[in-house]
Each structure stands twice: as structure tokens, then as C-alpha cells.
Amino acid sequence: MAQYRTQAKIIADILVTARDSNGGGEGVGITLLLRKGNVSYSRMIKLITDLVGAGLLVEENIDKISKYKISDKGLRFLQVYGQFEGFANSFGQRL
């Protein structure tokens, strides 16, 4: 049976990509987020809009190209998500 990712896992994957692939500090583009997040373009646009609105990602426009960086709040989300994932795993549960 296929294992599907939860919304929280997809958000964590996007934030990890924004954190780890931020070459030169200028942020990551939507193409990389699409590749690493493995979701459709329309869903990614909605997720990015929600994440920027929640303050987990910061959007910067460089030469009319949107780039995304993880915010301090996004880093905190990843930290707490990792702790909770470890807690859930210790009880044999998967997030």
C-alpha cells in the first residue's frame, strides 16, 4: 500500500528545501521547490502563498523573479516538527 505524505510533511519538505538549498543567500526559486516538494504547480503556488502569509517563508523579488527564503519562524517550525516526529515515531506512529 502506498504511503502518502501529510500536509505537514509536505510543508516540512518545502521548508527544508528553502533552508538547505539557499545558495548564496538569495533564496530558492519555485522550480527547485517543485522538484524537491514533488507536488503540482497549482498546489505549490497555494502552499507558498500560505507559507508566506503565515511567516514561515519570506518572498523576495529579484529582477522580477520570486525567490523564497526560510524565516526564523520557519526554522522554529522545523525544529518543533522534528521533535514531534521523533516523539510520534517512538510510539510507532508515522506523521
Image: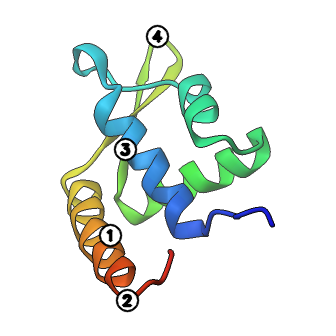
CB contact under 8 Å: marks 3 and 4: no
Upstream in sequence: badge 2 or badge 3: 3
- Asked whether, in this view, residue 72 is left or right of residue 37, the answer is left
Query: Foreground mark, 2 or 4?
Result: 2
- Asked whether, in this view, residue 40 is left or right of residue 36, the answer is right
Q: Residues within 10 Å of mark 3 (few under 14, many from 20)?
A: some
What's the residue type where badge 2 is placed?
Phe
Q: Position of residue 67 (x, y in %)?
A: 44, 27
CB contact under 8 Å: marks 4 and 1: no
Looking at the rendered structure, the secondary structure element under dot 3 is: helix
Give the residue pinned by disc 3.
Answer: 16
Q: Which mark is residue 81?
A: 1
What's the residue type where badge 4 is placed?
Asp
What's the residue type where badge 3 is placed?
Val
Upstream in sequence: badge 1 or badge 2: 1
CB contact under 8 Å: marks 3 and 1: no
* 88 vs 47: above or below: below
Q: Which mark is residue 63?
A: 4
Q: Residues within 10 Å of mark 1 (few under 14, many from 20)?
A: some
Query: Foreground mark, 3 or 4?
Result: 3
